[in-house]
Each structure stands twice: as structure tokens, then as C-alpha cells.
Amino acid sequence: MDLTVVTYVAYLLISVGLTVWVARTLSKNGRIFLADVLKGNEKLAEAVNHLLVVGFYLVNLGFVALYLKTADAIEETRGLLEALSVKIGVVLLVLGVMHLGNVYVLNKIRRRGVMEDRQTPPVGPQGWTQQAPAGPWAPPAPGQAGA
């Protein structure tokens, strides 16, 4: 068997394994975060989590497949290890960027929800306060002439 084919097989096994591991880890730990972002709506959090995992698989496995081909034929073990390390390193970087992108977007959504919650008062108005008495430092009340 040609060493180039061995490199391809090793690359695919390692890359697909890493992609599955990262996706499962993100899915398992992301449920809690999504439930918080979506204000405790567990059913919606589960659906969004599943959609994110599917998108993660599609993008990363598509990249792994496109990045499979190597420019040169591999003729020795050293070349196999060098090509494999470059390919796996790039896949790991893509997985990391995808993860950071997901966290960034979800954090933006979470912040928006927190800001919306802070805009509504926890208790509705219960009455009116009296207007402060006018003094020499205060502008004249409506209907009064200024001096």
C-alpha cells in the first residue's frame, strides 16, 4: 500500500474522530448555556443545540473532505508524519475557530436577552411622587413667568 493512501486513511480517522468528539462535547456542555440563553425553554434549547451540532458536522466534515488531497506523493514515514501533522493541525484550528464562533454568537444572544430583561422594571409603578418645590436654582414651574 502506498504511504500517501496510509496518510489519507490516518488523516480521515483522526479528523473524523476529533470532529465527533468536539461536537459531542459542545452538545453536552452547550445545553446548559443554551437553556440560559433561551430563558429556560428546554425544548427550544434542545432543538437549537441539535441544529448547531448538525451544522458543525456539515462544515467540519466538509472541510476535512476538501482538505484531504496532498500535493506531493509521500514516500517515507517522515513525510507521512509531517503531512499528517500539518493536516491535523489545520483541522484543529478550524474546529477551534468554529467553536469560538458559536460561543461568540450565543454570548451576543445571551447579552441581548439580559439587556432586555434589565429594561423592564421588576415592579410596576405604584404611584406618583410629588414635584420638588421650586427654588432660586430651579427653573420656573409650567405656567409661571420667569424672573
Image: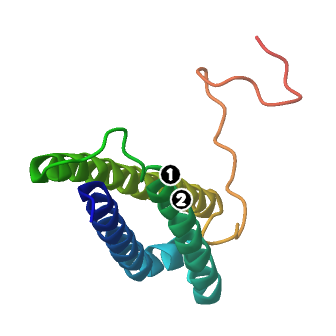
As drawn, the label of residue 66 is 1
Residue placed farthest to the top in the image? 147
Which residue is situated farthest in the front direction here? 1
Identify the residue at horizontal 44%, vertical 73% (top origin).
33
Where residue 29 appears, as percent x and y from the top left, is 37, 78
Q: Secondary structure at mark 1?
A: helix
- Residue lying at 89% horizontally and 28% vertically, measured from the top left: 143
- For image coordinates 65% across by 62% down, the residue present is 120
- Please tell me the numbered disc located at residue 62: 2
Q: Is residue 126 above or below residue 82?
A: below
Q: Position of residue 40 (x, y in %)?
A: 56, 83
Q: Residues within 10 Å of mark 1 (few under 14, many from 20)?
A: few
Could you tell whether 91 is left or right of 108 in the image? left
Left or right of residue 98: residue 133: right
User: Left or right: where does residue 37 sit relative to residue 8?
Assistant: right
Find the distance from the CA under tag 2 to the CA under tag 1.
6 Å
Q: 102 or 132: nearer the eye?
A: 102
Outermost residue on the left side: it is 78
Q: Say whether marks 2 and 1 touch (CB < 8 Å).
A: yes
Q: Residue at x 58, y 87 (%)?
A: 42
Query: Label 2 sits on what residue type?
Result: Gly
Residue 12 visible in the snapshot: yes
Q: Kindly state the secondary structure of the residue where label 2 is placed.
A: helix
Image x and y of residue 50, in percent: 58, 79
Q: Position of residue 30 (x, y in %)?
A: 43, 75
